[in-house]
Image (tube, rainbow, N blue to C red):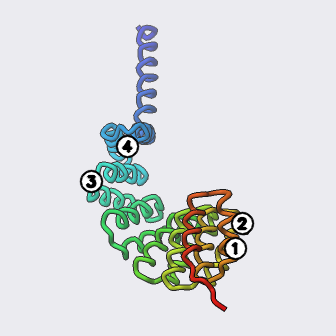
């Protein structure tokens, strides 16, 4: 009798172990990521809900649920899930970044943008996206010197980070610090020839009425981005003619 029962017992035990291995919080989380990447959002949400049902403190799963909420235009639920993730783990930079982006793009609440992104860089000072978004926020508040500081920091992390150049160029232009702009962009261009840095540097030279330097930038820019070069040339052509 025992000989007959033992194989059945072992088979049931193995099936139970296999079932448990494929139905852990982590396995549901991985399935949710796959569903999300395939744009199967309802299936992804179901998988993440199963993950947090099995592991109540699964902060990353709550972040992903928030991401799906935002993708589905359910901002209130997204914010709620991100905040649950932060309540579980206050150092979850993914949740902080996500909240900062919601408050920038959906809620347009600048102080909240600064709050969440500044907290993110306190935890990880290499997040270029956070410094860029803070530069945008300070530009929106017309605090241009602070915007310059944060945009420049983003570019220290990634010299080719194009959107940060946009905020940096706007900051310098808004407070008319064209000479400082030239010096900053020289540093960036010494690292790598980024077209947008060359464009904003050329613009600064036109404001400084240095046509020769502006034309040099135009010629160099024409080799790597003809559209940007044409925009710079329009600014150069509009410069006042020097009179003796």
Whether tag 3 and tag 1 are in contact, CB under 8 A, the answer is: no
Up-down: is 118 above or below 94?
below
Q: Nearer the viewer, residue 244 or 60?
A: 244
Answer with mark 4 or mark 1, whichever residue precedes in sequence. Answer: 4
Residue at (36% x, 72% y) in the render: 112
| Between 235 and 123, the one nearer to me in the picture | 235
Left or right, 41 with reference to 177: left
Q: Distance between the residues labelled 4 and 1?
A: 48 Å
The circle drawn on residue 74 is 3
Q: In this view, does 33 lie above or below 176?
A: above
Q: Which of 17 and 218 is in front in this view?
A: 218
* Between discs 4 and 2, the one toward the N terminus: 4
**Viewer-side label of 4, 1:** 1
Q: Distance between the residues labelled 3 and 1?
A: 43 Å
Label whose residue precedes the other's in the sequence (3 or 4): 4
Q: In this view, does 233 lie to the left or right of 98?
A: right
Q: Do the residues labelled 1 and 2 touch (CB within 8 Å)?
A: yes
- Residue in view at x 30 percent, y 66 percent: 107
In the image, residue 97 above or below residue 46 = below
The mark tally for this picture is 4
Asked whether disc 3 touches disc 4, contact meaning CB atoms under 8 Å apart, the reply is no
- Considering depth in this image, is 18 or 118 the residue closer to the camera? 118
The residue carrying mark 4 is: 51
> Which label sits on residue 187?
1
Q: Distance between the residues labelled 3 and 4?
A: 20 Å
SS at circle 1: helix
Q: Which circle marks residue 191 in the picture? A: 2
């Amino acid at each position: 009798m025992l000989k007959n029962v033992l194989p059945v017992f072992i088979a049931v035990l193995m099936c139970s172990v296999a079932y448990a291995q494929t139905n852990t919080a982590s396995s549901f989380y991985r399935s949710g990521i796959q569903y999300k990447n395939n744009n199967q959002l309802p299936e992804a949400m179901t998988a993440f809900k199963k993950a947090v049902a099995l592991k109540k403190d699964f902060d990353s799963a709550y972040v992903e649920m928030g991401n799906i909420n935002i993708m589905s235009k359910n901002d209130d639920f997204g914010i709620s899930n991100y905040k649950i993730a932060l309540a579980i783990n206050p150092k979850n930079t993914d949740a902080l970044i996500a909240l900062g982006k919601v408050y920038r793009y959906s809620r347009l609440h600048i102080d909240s943008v600064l709050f969440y992104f500044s907290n993110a860089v306190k935890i990880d000072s290499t997040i270029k996206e956070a410094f860029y978004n803070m530069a945008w926020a300070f530009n929106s508040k017309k605090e241009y010197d602070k915007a310059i500081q944060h945009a420049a920091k983003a570019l220290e992390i990634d010299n080719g980070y194009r959107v940060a150049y946009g905020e940096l160029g706007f900051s310098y232009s808004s407070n008319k610090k064209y000479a400082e702009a030239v010096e900053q962009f020289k540093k960036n261009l010494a690292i790598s020839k980024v077209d947008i840095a060359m464009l904003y540097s050329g613009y600064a030279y036109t404001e400084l009425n240095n046509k020769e330097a502006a034309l040099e930038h135009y010629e160099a820019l024409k080799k790597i981005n003809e559209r940007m070069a044409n925009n710079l040339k329009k600014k150069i052509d509009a410069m006042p003619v020097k009179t003796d």
